[in-house]
Image (cartoon, rainbow, N blue to C red):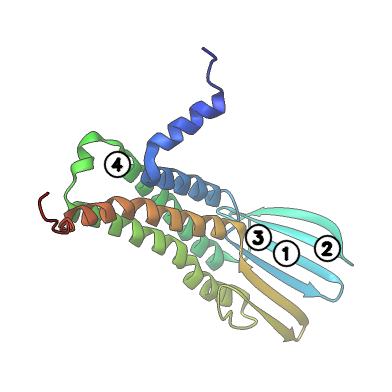
Amino acid sequence: MRPSLPWRTWAHRLVKLGPSRLALAAAILFALLALGTPVWALTQDVGGSREVSSYSWTTRIQDRYEAGAWDGTEILPYTSSRFAERTVAGALGTAYILDAVLILVLAVVFALFSMEHTRTMPTLSLLIVSLLVVGIALLALLYPVVAVPVAATTDFGAFTFGGFWGSWRTTAPPIDWSWGAGLGWWFLFVATLLGIVGATLPYIRSVRAMAPPVPRSWQPPT
């Protein structure tokens, strides 16, 4: 008998997880990626110079360009005395903590759905679990969308940041500003979708199992 290939073994293990746990596992992976990547980015164009600032959990990564050519990168911790955007750092710190809480909840739900006795959980219990995941996932996803623009308005003071995405031009001095979600937020967006799917599938299956069977059409005896 030929030995099974490693990728086939892993594929068989993944299939055995089922769609719910598979979605939860993928959600945990994407949420972990979100922890290590910037959630928000801000660009400032002044003449021929450009500065792109990416804000992660503990640092700001600033890339500088002169006449379109890269001119250097500075990695500045939020604890540095030269870092000025303290309110933005606080909002992002809370956002990353919520991401970590989401990872913990997804891991607990994954372990819960892996236990034998949970396959017969009441529908109400499954509803509570799914609502918990949905609530925390949406909170982790939407908190930076609401909090970061307010924090940026406080720190920069040049104008009002009208949303998580946007652009603005100031005239004194003339600066073109643009900002939006970083890669970490998009990872979190995917994790939210997968986590909601993985947490709600058992509840949906339980509800469908409660439905009465469709009556069979009557046929005369032969």
Of tags 1 and 4, the one toward the viewer is 4
Question: Residue visible at 23% across and 34% down?
Answer: 116
Q: Name the residue tied to disc 1.
A: 52
Tell me, yes or no, whether the two marked residues, 2 and 1, touch with CB atoms within 8 Å.
yes
Q: Secondary structure at mark 1?
A: strand
Q: Secondary structure at mark 2?
A: strand
Instruction: State whether residue 140 is above or below residue 9.
Output: below
Q: Earlier in the sequence, mark 4 or mark 3?
A: 3
Query: Which class describes the residues within 10 Å of circle 1: few (<14), some (14-19), or many (20+)?
Result: many
Query: Which class describes the residues within 10 Å of circle 4: few (<14), some (14-19), or many (20+)?
Result: many
Tell me, yes or no, whether the two marked residues, 3 and 1, touch with CB atoms within 8 Å.
yes
**Label 4, label 3: how many angstroms apart (C-alpha)?**
37 Å
Q: Secondary structure at mark 4?
A: helix
Instruction: State whether residue 149 is above or below residue 186.
Output: below
**Label 1, label 4: how many angstroms apart (C-alpha)?**
43 Å
Instruction: Indicate the position of residue 48 as horizontal and vertical percent values.
Output: 87, 72
**Label 4, label 2: how many angstroms apart (C-alpha)?**
50 Å
Question: Residue visible at 51% across and 12% down?
Answer: 1
- The total of numbered circles placed on residues is 4
Q: Name the residue tied to disc 2.
A: 65
Q: Name the residue tied to disc 4.
A: 113
The amino acid pointed to by label 2 is Tyr
The amino acid pointed to by label 3 is Ser
Q: Quadrant of residue 152?
A: bottom right
Q: Earlier in the sequence, mark 3 or mark 2?
A: 3
Q: Earlier in the sequence, mark 1 or mark 4?
A: 1
Of tags 4 and 3, the one toward the viewer is 4
Report the residue that reaches farthest toward the bottom.
171
**Label 3, label 1: how many angstroms apart (C-alpha)?**
7 Å
Q: For this view, does 11 lie left or right of residue 81?
A: left
Q: Quadrant of residue 18?
A: top left
Q: Name the residue tied to disc 3.
A: 54
